[in-house]
Image: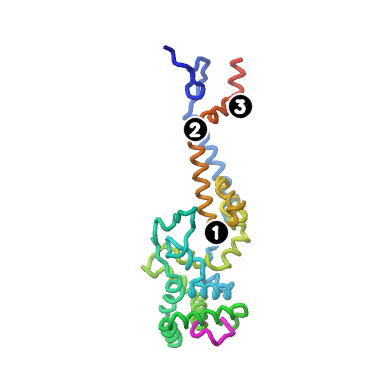
Amino acid sequence: MKRRYRPDVDVPEWTGGHYPYDILKEGTIALVVVLLITVTLSIFFGSPDEPAITIKAWSTAAPIDYAQTAFSELNGTSGTASYGAPYNQGDSQRLGPLQLEKWMGVRIPINAAQDFVLGPLQSLPGQPALTSALHTFQTASDATRNAWFDAYTKAEATMSFAKDQVVVPTTAAGPVPLMINDLTAMARSGALDQALLTRNSFYTTNYTQTLLLLSDGTYLANVAQQQHLLGTQWGMMNETGSYPGQAWLWLYTLWYQVPPYSQSSNGDVEVFGTLVLLSAFLLFVPFIPGLRSVPRRLGIYKLIWREHYRDQS
């Protein structure tokens, strides 16, 4: 019994003509042409070489922003301090009832107050006033610390920077103003960059803590905005200097520009979930009856291979 021909699955045996094709020759030519074009363009339009943004550069250009960020690390209100896994136990992003970040746990433990403020300050030698301030802060009760934090927060709006000092108009913040001022001086000297990089070993390429601290302030975001690198500017697809970047990322970046993703605190995980669903749908298109027949029924392939079908007519 002859089996019924299924146009969506079965491929008929080709009985038409054949043309010789040397795939090695064509591939070699294509490789050489692309290589020449790439080398030529890289000579005249090389990738921009922007200097790295360091904590020293940040605290020098915007000392108030740095001081305010350092205070947010100390009182636990910064983005890193409340981020959640893999850095700490803060609230994490959710996909419905699922907390995907917490599934992996805290793999890179970071205590923002200790790692970004107290630890670096404790490494400064020969500072009696600072040593006393740190002791006062660390032995104070939570209620006392919160009172200092409240006083400093109220004075932040009028804080200024003059004669290399962070000036905070309050006397009710205990040792906090001295600590933040000395930390700002440490950052402006470049010592904080080294302290964060060499904490675990002298030679290191782990910039995690430095990058997290930079991301908690507004200076890095302002520089990114000038370079059109913010998420709201399709930044994932760009390079510095308004150079075109990874255009193939448009499908991922697109979702960050539209509601509800652009307005959601769970935007990252929601975009991830959406892309997983779309990828699964694309993967199973060949197995969906009717939908898999659309290309054959539209006949677009006949336009692509029009020379072949013209020869066959």
Q: Residue at x 42, y 12 (%)?
A: 1
Which residue lies under the disc numbered 3?
A: 298
Q: How many marks?
A: 3
Amino acid on which disc 1 is placed: Ser
- Residue 174: within the magenta? yes
Amino acid on which disc 3 is placed: Leu
Q: Which residues are magenta?
A: 166-176
Q: Residue at x 59, y 61 (%)?
A: 224
Crowd class of label 3 (few under 14; some 14 to 19; many from 20; radius 10 Å): few
Question: Upstream in the sequence, badge 3 or badge 1?
Answer: 1
Which residue lies under the disc numbered 2?
A: 27
Q: Residue at x 51, y 37 (%)?
A: 282
Of the two numbered discs 3 and 2 in the rendering, the one whose residue sits closer to the viewer: 3
Task: Confirm or deny contact between disc 3 and disc 1 (CB under 8 A).
Answer: no
- Give the image location of residue 186, x and y in percent: 49, 77
Which residue lies under the disc numbered 1?
A: 265
Task: Give the residue furthest to the left.
Answer: 201
